[in-house]
Image (cartoon, rainbow, N blue to C red):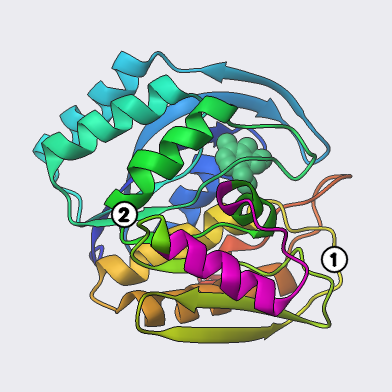
Amino acid sequence: MKPRSKILIIAGSDSSGGAGIQADIKTITCLGSYAMTAITAITAQNTKNVLSVIPVPTNSIKKQIIHTAVDIKPDAIKIGMLHSSQVVKKVLESLSQIKVKKIILDPVMIAKGGEKLIDDKAIQLVKKRLLQKVNLVTPNIPEAEVITGIKINSKQDMVKAGKKLITLGARNVLIKGGHLKSKKVVDIYLNKRDLKIFVSSRHNTKNTHGTGCTLSSAITTFFSCGKSIKSACELGIKYVNSAILTNPKYGKGHGPINHLNSILLDKRFK
Ligand code: PXL
């Protein structure tokens, strides 16, 4: 088959392959689209912890974005780890030059092992200048708490924080409820006019490394292919949920999920 769409990923590299740009490429590929990349930082990590983070020079990030996009125009962009305010500034500059209409932002802040992946100045800039330029922002509960200043302990708090994100200028918000202590996982999609609660079964596993990256890439792929943001969220949530269920149990810490869950390759090897 030919790829259904072309997507540019702006994110960090995860050497363990479960999160970051590696998760993004796998997701976009497995869902049938073509992935291009601008790498913002290089992490050395495994399923247990992040050993180091090396920032990529910001001029190089801008070059990766512009030089790639002027040749193969992306149908959509997915933004992940941004690391510092200089990176956020360069990404903003680059976005205004390439004029791609569909942009999804995963406001990555902390790795599964607890390591910080973005500094405080960058968070403020994301809140003040980037949030308003994207079609959808997909914070998890800790990220929504940091951006809105609202403590989240319930579904109602999630809605409150979602509404605050809209008043801050976000067009569409998906707050992911995986961190909430609840029997089912509740994700809340909202904008000025609409509110939808997605309920999924919770799988009892520690192997959830890269779920956020995977979800935002899946949503970007569906959105780039013409689905509405809301149905792209619904389809993305289903993809991640079965990727968690079929996780390959790799590593001794928080293992990766199964990006290949959308693909049947068995026959080719018989
Ligand atoms: O899942 C958040 C994330 C994003 N980007 C990179 C990461 C991680 C988590 O480990 O390493 C590069």
Contact between marks 2 and 1 (CB within 8 A): the answer is: no
Residue 66 magenta-drawn?
no
Q: Position of residue 7 (x, y in %)?
A: 29, 52
Q: Residue at x 67, y 37 (%)?
A: 16
Q: Which residue is mark 1?
A: 205
**Do we see residue 129 in this rendering?**
yes
Q: Position of residue 19 (x, y in %)?
A: 60, 46
Question: Is the residue 173 above or below the residue 124 in the image?
Answer: below
**Do we see residue 270 in this rendering?**
no
Q: Position of residue 32 (x, y in %)?
A: 35, 66
Quarter of the figure with residue 206? bottom right
**SS under mark 2:** loop
Question: Is the residue 76 above or below the residue 188 in the image?
Answer: above
**SS under mark 1:** loop
Residue 154 magenta-drawn?
yes
Nearer to us in this view, 265 or 110: 110
Q: Residue at x 27, y 34 (%)?
A: 92
Which region shows up in magenta? Answer: 147-166
Q: Nearer the viewer, mark 2 or mark 1?
A: 2
Callout 1: CB less than 8 Å from ligand 1: no
- Amino acid type, residue under disc 1 in the picture: Thr
Nearer to us in this view, 82 or 149: 149
Mark-to-mark CA distance, 2 and 1: 32 Å
User: Left or right of 169: which side holds 149?
Assistant: right
Q: Residue at x 10, y 37 (%)?
A: 71
* Quarter containing the N terminus: bottom left
Q: Position of residue 58 (x, y in %)?
A: 36, 17
Nearer to us in this view, 202 or 257: 202
In this rendering, the count of numbered labels is: 2
Which quarter of the frame holds ligand 1? top right
Q: Which residue is mark 2?
A: 134
For disc 1, the neighbor class at 10 Å (few under 14, some 14 to 19, many from 20) is few
